[in-house]
Amino acid sequence: MKPLLALALVVLAAGPAAGNPASAALRAKGASEIYNLDRDRAVESFKQAVAADPQDAAAYRGLAGALWLSITFRRGNMTVDDYLGGVTRTKSPAAPPPPDVVAAFNDALEHALSIARARVAANPRDAGAHYELGAAIGLRASFTATVDNSMVSAFRSAKGAYQEHEKVLELDASRKDAGLIVGTYRYIVSTLALPMRLAAYVIGFGGDKEKGLQLVEGAAGYAGDNQEDARFALLLLYNREKRYDDAMKLLATLRDRFPRNRLMWLESGSTSLRAGRPADAERFLSDGIARFAGDTRQRMFGEDALWWYKRGAARAALGRADARADLEKALAVEGRKWVQGRTHLELGKIDRKAGARAAAAEHFGNAVRLCESDNDQAYADEARRLLK
């Protein structure tokens, strides 16, 4: 459950009418900056939004969200690949988050929760107040799951977020933005093993994969302040469902909306690879590498290794001789163990095809070891099969 919990509850932008116009404009600016990977700018914009209206819960929540994403970015687990398998169930090798950033996150989120709870208490039938409270609780769940690695506490928070946004839909059925959290958890519950699914029903979660998808799609098509959050969540769900054409259409929108977000080119290449379209993958990845060659902003942990591995895999699928050079570059830079393992797998396939059996066996052995160490079992199994 942790992978979807982490991605689906990225709720950065503002809730409904809370906050004055200056605060609202600054929140919108901060949300755009965070999705363009301008993380430091986003933190400053949300701080300015808080200063413009200290009673705007959404401004505090936006600040907390930007700080949380800065931690997640450093850890290198912000791609769809991380949330399709089990690799996010292992701890990132990146350094622990700076204590001052964690403290700032907790301070901002506590302000958001306090203001939202006061609004709900003052008017229990205020759909906007329930939305804001649920979004803040959901952000707490995401942080707890991804930074604190405490699934029990995260699940408890997730329940509160789900219930608050179900209340929003009950009070105002037109508020499709509340469908992001409700729909995501319906989808998650539907994918659980039967005993866990029954336990989730008892706790208070709903199921139904199709209804869950429809709710998230509704949020992605609704001109609310979490529309971009819903689009990113939907990108993951479409990949899980192997709806690659839908995912690529969504990626085209995201590349247009956030032209400074180089990860959208990386995701476009990755999705093309999953769809069995290596030529498209190679084109997106080469374009991204060239387009952002001069980008001096901080890279995600292990990001360069991902770019070289992905393009190497695409070129290998096309039978291109330059695939090996990309794959060797992936191993020469800092990277996640699962990325290194998959890179060895691709190199092993190249050597096997060339008749270099000893070299291939060494790569496959490394792939098994590295992938298993990072809970990437499917690729470890493939390497073991080829090794035999």
Image (cartoon, helix red, strand yellow):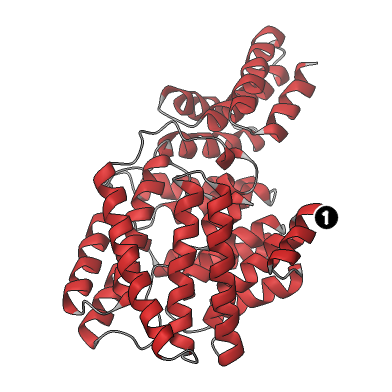
Left or right: 171 as drawn, with respect to 383: left
Give the quarter of the image for residue 209.
Answer: bottom right
> Can residue 40 be seen from the camera position used here?
yes
Query: 90 or 367, which lies in front?
Result: 90
Query: 155 or 216, which lies in front?
Result: 155
Pointer 1 residue: 194
Q: Residue at x 37, y 61 (%)?
A: 65
Disc 1 is placed on an element classified as: helix
Left or right: 118 as drawn, with respect to 307: left
Check disc 1 and give the amino acid type: Leu
> Can residue 33 be seen from the camera position used here?
no
Residue 57 vs 202, above or below: the answer is below
Label 1: how many residues lie within 10 Å, few (<14), some (14-19) or many (20+)? Answer: few
Residue 240 vs 136, above or below: the answer is above
Q: Position of residue 374 (x, y in %)?
A: 58, 30
Q: Residue at x 48, y 24 (%)?
A: 331
Q: Position of residue 129 (x, y in %)?
A: 43, 84
Q: Position of residue 303 (x, y in %)?
A: 42, 39
Residue at the top extreme, as displayed: 358
